[in-house]
Image (cartoon, rainbow, N blue to C red):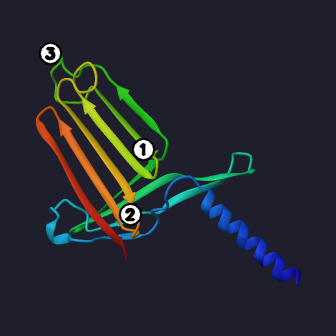
């Protein structure tokens, strides 16, 4: 009887643990739902392992949250992996790279990975002017959202000083 009660208690703890973490769990391999309508640069598959933190630096239990987010993007003939820390917002502002101040190298760049409700948002940009969106500049926003059927919607918006704004939306299903 004690074994049965222990198993039930453990089951309830695991269920509470899984429901309590912050964010949506994207951990799985995703396959592009309609590859014929995608461009050559659209990944045909995404693998998404990420780490769930359950203890603080002293080893004490805490409310679980996703800390790192790795995306393995599979395009024809190659795989590119990138790792992001969720909740990190940062950037760099550098000096001028030429005496005229018009060099093509970025003077500054910024990045952020954050939750917007149940949508995971990746933002990045660079610029050569005195502040963002000045000089030669680019901005990129990628949003990940699961629909009610469990499909992954990825919406990528890019814009810049020399490019018209562009939005690409693709849907992935679990493998």
Q: Which residue is mark 2?
A: 147
Regarding mark 1 in the picture, which secondary structure is present there?
strand
Regarding mark 2 in the picture, which secondary structure is present there?
loop
- Identify the residue at horizontal 26%, vertical 18% (top origin): 130
109 with respect to 4 (left or right): left
* Quarter of image, res 36: bottom left
Near-viewer residue (96 or 66): 66
Relative to 33, say whether 143 is above or below: above
Where, quadrant-wise, is the N terminus in this rendering? bottom right
Mark 3–mark 1 distance (CA, rounded to whole Å)? 34 Å
The earlier-in-sequence mark between 3 and 2 is: 3
- Identify the residue at horizontal 61%, vertical 61% (top origin): 19
Mark 3–mark 2 distance (CA, rounded to whole Å)? 50 Å
**Whole-percent x and y of residue 50?**
49, 59
The earlier-in-sequence mark between 3 and 1 is: 3
Q: Which residue is mark 3?
A: 100
The label number, if any, that marks residue 113 in the structure image:
1
Please give the count of numbered marks on the rendered protein.
3
The earlier-in-sequence mark between 1 and 2 is: 1
Near-viewer residue (165 or 88): 165
Mark 1–mark 2 distance (CA, rounded to whole Å)? 20 Å
Where, quadrant-wise, is the C terminus in this rendering? bottom left
Near-viewer residue (134 or 2): 2
In this rendering, which labeled residue sits more in front, label 3 or label 2?
2
């Amino acid at each position: 009887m004690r074994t049965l009660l222990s198993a039930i208690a453990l089951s309830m703890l695991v269920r509470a643990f899984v429901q309590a973490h912050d964010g949506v769990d994207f951990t799985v391999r995703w396959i592009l739902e309609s590859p014929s309508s995608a461009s050559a640069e659209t990944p045909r598959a995404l693998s998404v392992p990420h780490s769930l933190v359950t203890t603080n630096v002293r080893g004490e239990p805490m409310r679980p949250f996703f800390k790192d987010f790795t995306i393995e993007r599979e395009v024809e003939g190659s795989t590119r992996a990138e790792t992001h820390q969720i909740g990190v917002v940062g950037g760099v502002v550098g000096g001028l790279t030429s005496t005229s101040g018009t060099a093509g190298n970025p003077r500054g760049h910024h990045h952020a990975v954050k939750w917007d409700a149940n949508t995971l948002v990746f933002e990045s940009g660079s610029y050569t002017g005195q502040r963002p969106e000045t000089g030669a500049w680019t901005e990129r926003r990628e949003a990940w959202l699961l629909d009610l059927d469990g499909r992954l919607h990825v919406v990528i918006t890019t814009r810049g000083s020399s490019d018209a704004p562009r939005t690409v939306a693709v849907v992935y299903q679990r493998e």
